[in-house]
Image (tube, helix red, strand yellow):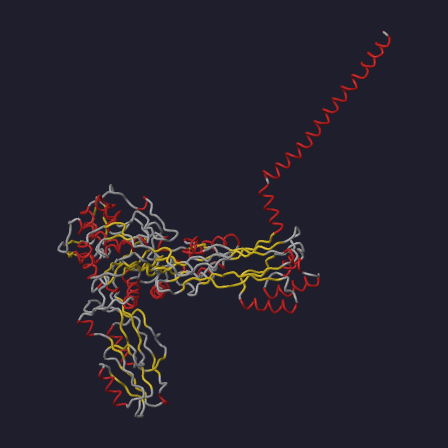
Amino acid sequence: MATSEKKSSSEMNVRAPARGMKLRAVLVLLVIVFVAFGGVIAQLFHWQINQGDSLQQEAVAQQLSDTVTSPNRGKILDRNGNTLAESQLVWTVIMSPAAIESEEDRLTIAEDISALLEVDRDTLYAKTQKTYSQFEYVKKKIPRAKVEELATWVSEKQMGGVFRVITDYKRVYPYGSLASTVLGFTGAEGTGLYGLEAMYEGTLAGEAGRVITTQNGWGEKMPNTLSYEKTIDANDGNWLVLTIDQTIQHYAEKYLEEAVRSTGCTNRGLAVMMDVKTGGILALAVKGDYDPNDPFTVADPDVLAQLAELSGDEESTARAAALQKQWNNKVVYDFYEPGSVFKVFTSCMGIEEGVASENTTFRCGGSLTVLGRKMNCHVYPSAHGTQTFAQAISNSCNPAFMNLGLSVGAKNFFKYFVGFGFTELTGIDMLGESKVTSALYYDDTMGDVSLATNSIGQTFKITPIQMITAISAVANGGDLMTPYVVAEQLDSAGNVVKATTPTVRRQVISKDTASRVSAMLAAAVNGGGSRNAYVAGYRVAGKTGTSDKTETAQTENNVWASFAGYAPADDPQVAILVVLDEPHSAIRYGGTISAPVAQKILADALPYLGIEPIYTDAELANMNSATPTVVGKEVNTAASLVKSQGLEYYVVGDGSTVLKQVPDGGATIPKGGQVVLYTETTVADKTVTVPKFEGMTLAQANQAAAASGVNILIKGLVTGATGDPKVSTQSVAGGSTAPRGTVVTVNFIYADAIE
């Protein structure tokens, strides 16, 4: 019994370790299983939770082909509804390489389509080999004619499943360079890069649409039974309606370009016109500019010639600088010293503060010494002597205005300097407006020397947009307006989304002060030192300026020549500023080269705006006439009609009936001018040689015109003004031939050395 019990105990001792090992094995196995499945679970958690969204997007991307369709970018219109910028319909060609059936077809596509659409043959062939893809761009923004050619080719080759076209848009500027520095331009993808196109990108751009199509994991389109396609329409952009008037803009650019070319400006020129009552910009011209249809081409031929002489990095740097310069809007971006135009504001300060009146006299001895520093008048060593306030403005006398500024005092001077907006942004709704920093003007603690020079518009800088805004405040009775170029925003249905309300920032001077200063400025134009801005029938008020570029090497050409003014002087409607930067002409004065630009723009713009002229008796006596229409009438009858209009007649031929007349019926001709009546066809083409009138006085021009048989239409002469003006330009070139009786417009300029 004892033995048996021992045996059982021994057997139990043998089995015990086996059971322990089994338990440990089970535990190890459970740990292994847990670790293994734990990793799987962790990985599943990572895939489904951490990366679930991105994996879902990848899955969708493998199953769906997503093509973006462009919205129609909003138009930009002038204030009369003329289109200045629009997007024209073009097409983008896409290709499905997966649908190409053979290598032969791939080669055919590479050869034919590369030639048809003008794309690189090897690049196109490489795309045809992407047999997993159903979407490859072939060419973007092609015109209708190319689409029609492609359609014919696809039909002939039976490749309808390979190619597809989707609508797109290309930005177009119908008037070329007109207002280019205002409008700006878009890039290749249709995004605004400069000007209003960039400023109002969010308004103009709209929202892109999409075309979504199913495909399998290889990028191939799903079978028809499983196909799916959804189109999300693009939302077109809103339109902009500007305050810019296309016609006035044309006038401004036409006459500014003539001046920039004739004076050889090396740093461009500008002309801007503002509605003084609202702050709306009617015209903003900069020359030289560029064509926004081709903005990356340097437009200035002289600059192109200079670039042609460069190479490598030097050429690239110079080209980039030239492009940047032509894109910049000089009116809002550039600084300049206003020079004597600023005397308008010094005049306002003196009147408003009561330190001067129309009866105040100023003594000019040719110079003024302030704290030991001698500062000359522009006529030095001559002198103006004793002069009234109005005469001081007309003479643009530096000592007079330095004394006036000193009388106003630094504190008051700076108060009005700030009031007229010369230390802050104007707030115009355009990109790139430059803010003048404190380094470019002085505060109310300035010394007398600085005060004297500031009073005549020197030793500080402003922007042209600040100047036109400030001069408009004088014109409208003292209110400083916020300038703007966008009047309204419209949706694609023509509904007004947003309209600009004219904003008065503050009143700077009283209406009484503005009216009194305007009267003196009008005297300066209508017979005084600014008379080259005179327009018959309209009393123009204004001031000329010529300021040296003191920070650069001094030469005769390192100046800003300018004119700022408004009209009509007794009820101002528009203000105008013209600045010619670095003119290289024999005469550099603002009164001689800038004022005539303003005169020509105003002479065209004021009647166009419906502002009625009010002629003086002297102006009426010199009024032009309209020629009567006498073709087909008996000679005696025709002669009587011509004489009744205060005109002379000259008969050519022995016929009894008028077959042709020069000038034509309804043409403008000076009183006392000659109408030539042709009575025979054999002599109807008889011509005369047009004299070269440039440089002639009025008497010489009249004599030359009479001797040659042409009529001259006179522009720029101020009735009753003193001086000896001479012809600066003529509408028909001297030495050319023209029919007898042709009317040649001649522009007279007073060669005044007024700064």
Which of these two is toward me, 366 or 127? Answer: 127
Which of these two is toward me, 66 or 564? Answer: 66
Q: Indicate the quadrant containing the N terminus: top left, top right, bottom left or bottom right.
A: top right
At x 23%, y 50%, the residue is 508
**Taking 716 as reference, is 318 above or below it?**
above
Farthest residue in the left direction? Answer: 359
At x 23%, y 80%, the residue is 672
At x 36%, y 57%, the residue is 486
**Taking 41 as reference, is 130 above or below it?**
below
Q: Is residue 263 visible?
A: no
Using residue 343 as the reference point, say whether residue 680 is left or right of it.
right
How far from the left and from the top, in percent, is residue 350? 18, 50
How far from the left and from the top, in percent, is residue 242? 36, 59
Q: Is residue 369 visible?
A: yes
Total of numbered circles in the picture? 0
> In which quadrant of the rendered view does residue 599 lie?
bottom left
How far from the left and from the top, in percent, is residue 530? 24, 62
Using residue 503 as the reference point, say whether residue 403 is left or right of it.
left
Q: Indicate the quadrant containing the C terminus: top left, top right, bottom left or bottom right.
A: bottom left
> In which quadrant of the rendered view does residue 237 lie?
bottom left
Farthest residue in the front direction? Answer: 1
> In which quadrant of the rendered view does residue 630 lie?
bottom left
How far from the left and from the top, in percent, is residue 75? 42, 61
Farthest residue in the top direction? Answer: 2
